[in-house]
Image: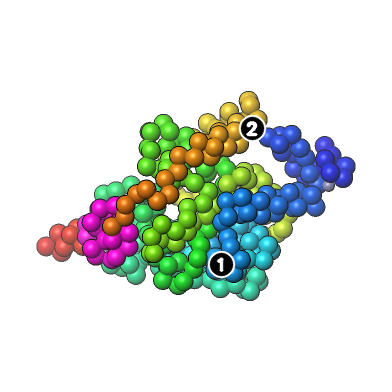
Amino acid sequence: MKCKKCSKTAVIRLIQHNTAFCAEHFIEYFEKCIQRTITEYSMIQKDDRVLVAVSGGKDSMTLWYVLNKLGYKTSGLLIDTGIGELKSNVISDFAVKMSRELMIVDVKEYLSGLTTPEVAKLIRRPTCSVCGLIRRYLMNKVAYENGYDLLVTGHNLDDEVSFLLGNLLNWNLEYLQRQAPFMPKTHKRIVAKAKPLVWLTEKEIYVYAMLNEIPFESERCPFSKDASSLRYKSLLNRLEIDQPGTKLRFYKQFQRLSLFQRDAILLNECVTCGYPTTTDKCSFCRMRERIENAMGEQAN
Ligand SMILES: [Zn+2]
Ligand SMILES: [Zn+2]
């Protein structure tokens, strides 16, 4: 297998694009793909302060590395949910190496001293949905309160097509309308959000991370092993083997539909915290109330 650009030995074959690249040309292709996505969706303006949500996994670490290499002004945000052992050393060493700031937020400070799994158990909700709610709320809050223009996450093509399939199977229109690569600011307390890796697969990100010696943790969240998103991923991987390019086509055609609702939703401000919500109290504050009630019951 030879590189389509220079005929050196290829390190990766991209069957969905009917091509193969050597290390040098794969790195070039990968970075251009991210820059093209940023430009196409007008994700980042010159001088924007960008907050990168980092977990220590390959996607977020690679995203942070590439944005830096492309010259964007970035800082990292690590949310310590209390799940597993916190790999903050790997991330903070990486931040030092890139000369970038890293903020670490401990969820316990916002949840009466409890970790995410403890909250889920106490209020009897699935850990993954509690974790998602907490992370979304805190990422936006931290980005807004620290004056960032944009919050970026490392969602890749495999994540996006798996969400898409799940949202379609359940006809979850509200989620489908928000599953865009870029969501602009629609309220003064909502920070714009972008996913610059949406056109890259897990395999491409993994190979790029290895070639550039980007440190990352390959451990999967212990709560995600039964998550339906993993079943959708394995189903889509099988489809991709039979019909290469399925994932790209599926996501591309969805983008063309432009179902996205950017400003049509009328937002109120939460009576407790002031952050936008579609009801009178946001789901984060409602969850905090349930925690306090459950703790009160336990104490009695
Ligand atoms: Zn080459
Ligand atoms: Zn609230």
Residue lying at the far left in this picture: please name it. 300
Left or right: residue 80 versus residue 196 is left
- The segment highlighted magenta reads 269-291
Report which residue position mark 1 lands on: 48
Residue in view at x 58 percent, y 28 percent: 239
Report which residue position mark 2 lands on: 245
For the residue pair 297 and 162, the one nearer the viewer reads as 162
> From what the image shows, is residue 197 above or below residue 47?
above
Q: Is residue 289 magenta?
A: yes
Q: Position of residue 134 (x, y in %)?
A: 37, 58
Left or right: residue 28 versus residue 95 is right
For the residue pair 75 and 96, the one nearer the viewer reads as 75
Q: Is residue 156 magenta?
A: no
For label 2, the SS is loop
- Residue type at mark 1 is Asp
CA distance separating discs 2 and 1: 34 Å
Q: 10 Å neighbourhood of mark 1: few (<14), some, or many (≥20)? A: some
- Residue type at mark 2 is Gly
Left or right: residue 36 versus residue 177 is right
* Residue 135 visible in image: no
